[in-house]
């Protein structure tokens, strides 16, 4: 093995958790989340629309961060909110609760959810647990743990459902980067066109890329491939969230990648409220997960794109998501490709 070779090792659970909670102890991630007005306003509305179920009730906020959702619940009339946060951002949540004069109703508990002892069961669980491609971070496991241990029978979970979508996309930026190497000769008199293959291998690799995808990039109607009911989903089911898809292309183009995104839904008396990370909606900090094919594939109007997709935790770090797509485009034979979130911490020199 060369001096520069790297290999991946499996991290133990406590190292995974240390790295994970450490990533939430800095201001940047909380700034990004609070500044994401689509996210934060939809949670705010989702909580207020359920105020009849919250008024005078006990709420558990799983992963409270700065305490923003706990404060929304207190403003919606909760009698008591347990704001559980494992990272050191909990110290800031204490200050924010005090600043808003809610210390009589919100109790910040600086601990992992899995190790807390509460004096009572709760009527409502609220949590913002979604990661890239919905399941990155595996935080939904903690919400399920909380539901099974602390939620009263018939209690409310906000949000209460999640849906996953896929669509083929064209990526003009990647197209431009690949074409670039054929333009070098015209500019400098040196032919670098043979770099195109190398560039394709580097760019269209096995990393899950998090990019904002625009409506114009999307080549078919979205296809829903999985839905999770938070009232019933089990830890076992989260080990492999999968489904099939079948899309029909709008017109002539090249498919460079699949794009995956999610919605979560808040129940409401009249119309349920949806927080969407779709490329057809306003951008959120989750953007979209982009999975590049090995090669671009030309398609025409009505070309069928079908397959199966599966999301599962990485073997090296159970908080990291992997995605496998088995797909057929038009008359092509079946292809399979597995993707993972790139992580410098998993590489040991
Ligand atoms: C996506 S952030 C959401 C923060 C906040 N609720 C908000 O909406 O701005 C998730 C937070 O949950 C915390 N968290 C994740 N899993 C947890 C667990 N098992 N126990 C306690 N805190 C947890 C993380 O440290 C992080 O601060």
Image (spheres, rainbow, N blue to C red):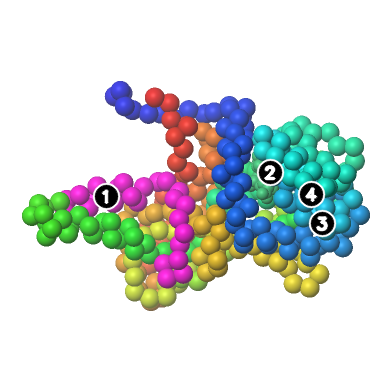
Q: Of label 1 and label 2, which has the lower sequence position?
A: 2
Viewer-closest of 61 and 269? 61
Q: Of label 2 and label 3, which has the lower sequence position?
A: 2
Q: Secondary structure at mark 2?
A: loop
- Residue at the image position 39 percent from the left and 72 percent from the top: 303
Q: Are marks 1 and 4 in contact (CB under 8 Å)?
A: no
In space, the residues marked 1 and 4 are separated at their CA atoms by: 53 Å
Q: Which residue is mark 2?
A: 65
- The image shows a total of numbered marks equal to 4
Image position of 52 (left or right of 249): right
Image position of 191 (left or right of 108): left
- Indicate if the residue with disc 2 has its beta carbon within 8 Å of ligand 1: yes
Q: Secondary structure at mark 3?
A: helix
Identify the disc placed on residue 100: 4
Q: Of label 1 and label 4, which has the lower sequence position?
A: 4
Give the position of the N terminus as an image quadrant: top left
Neighbor class of circle 3 (other Cα within 10 Å; few <14, some 14-19, many 20+) is: some
Q: Which residue is mark 1?
A: 199
Q: Are marks 3 and 1 in contact (CB under 8 Å)?
A: no
Q: Position of residue 340 (x, y in %)?
A: 47, 44
Q: Secondary structure at mark 1?
A: helix
């Amino acid at each position: 093995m060369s001096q520069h070779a790297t290999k991946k090792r499996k991290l133990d659970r406590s190292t995974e958790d240390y790295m994970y909670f450490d990533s939430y102890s800095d201001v940047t991630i909380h700034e990004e989340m609070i500044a994401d007005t689509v996210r934060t306003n939809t949670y705010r509305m989702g909580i207020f629309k359920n105020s009849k179920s919250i008024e005078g009730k006990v709420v558990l906020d799983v992963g409270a961060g700065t305490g923003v959702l706990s404060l929304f619940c207190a403003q919606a009339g909760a009698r008591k909110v347990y704001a559980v946060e494992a990272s050191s951002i909990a110290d800031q949540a204490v200050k924010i609760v005090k600043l808003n004069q809610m210390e009589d109703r919100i109790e910040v508990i600086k601990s992992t959810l899995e190790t807390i002892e509460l004096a009572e069961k709760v009527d409502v669980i609220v949590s913002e647990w979604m990661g890239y491609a919905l399941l990155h971070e595996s935080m939904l496991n903690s919400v399920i743990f909380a539901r099974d241990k602390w939620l009263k029978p018939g209690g409310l979970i906000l949000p209460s459902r999640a849906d996953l979508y896929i669509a083929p996309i064209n990526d003009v930026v990647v197209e431009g980067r690949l074409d670039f190497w054929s333009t070098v000769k015209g500019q400098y008199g040196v032919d670098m066109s043979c770099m195109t293959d190398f560039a394709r291998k580097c760019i269209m690799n096995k990393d899950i890329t998090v990019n904002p995808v625009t409506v114009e990039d999307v080549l078919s109607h979205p296809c829903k491939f999985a839905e999770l009911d938070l009232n019933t989903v089990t830890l076992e089911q989260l080990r492999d969230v999968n489904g099939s898809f079948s899309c029909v292309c709008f017109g002539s183009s090249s498919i460079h990648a699949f794009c995956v995104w999610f919605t979560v839904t808040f129940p409401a008396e009249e119309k349920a409220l949806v927080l969407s990370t779709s490329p057809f909606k306003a951008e959120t900090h989750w953007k979209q997960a982009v999975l590049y094919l090995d090669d671009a594939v030309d398609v025409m109007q009505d070309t069928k794109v079908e397959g199966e997709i599966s999301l599962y935790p990485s073997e090296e770090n159970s908080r990291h998501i992997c995605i496998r797509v088995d797909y057929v485009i038009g008359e092509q034979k079946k292809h399979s490709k597995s993707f993972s979130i790139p992580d410098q911490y998993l590489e040991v020199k």
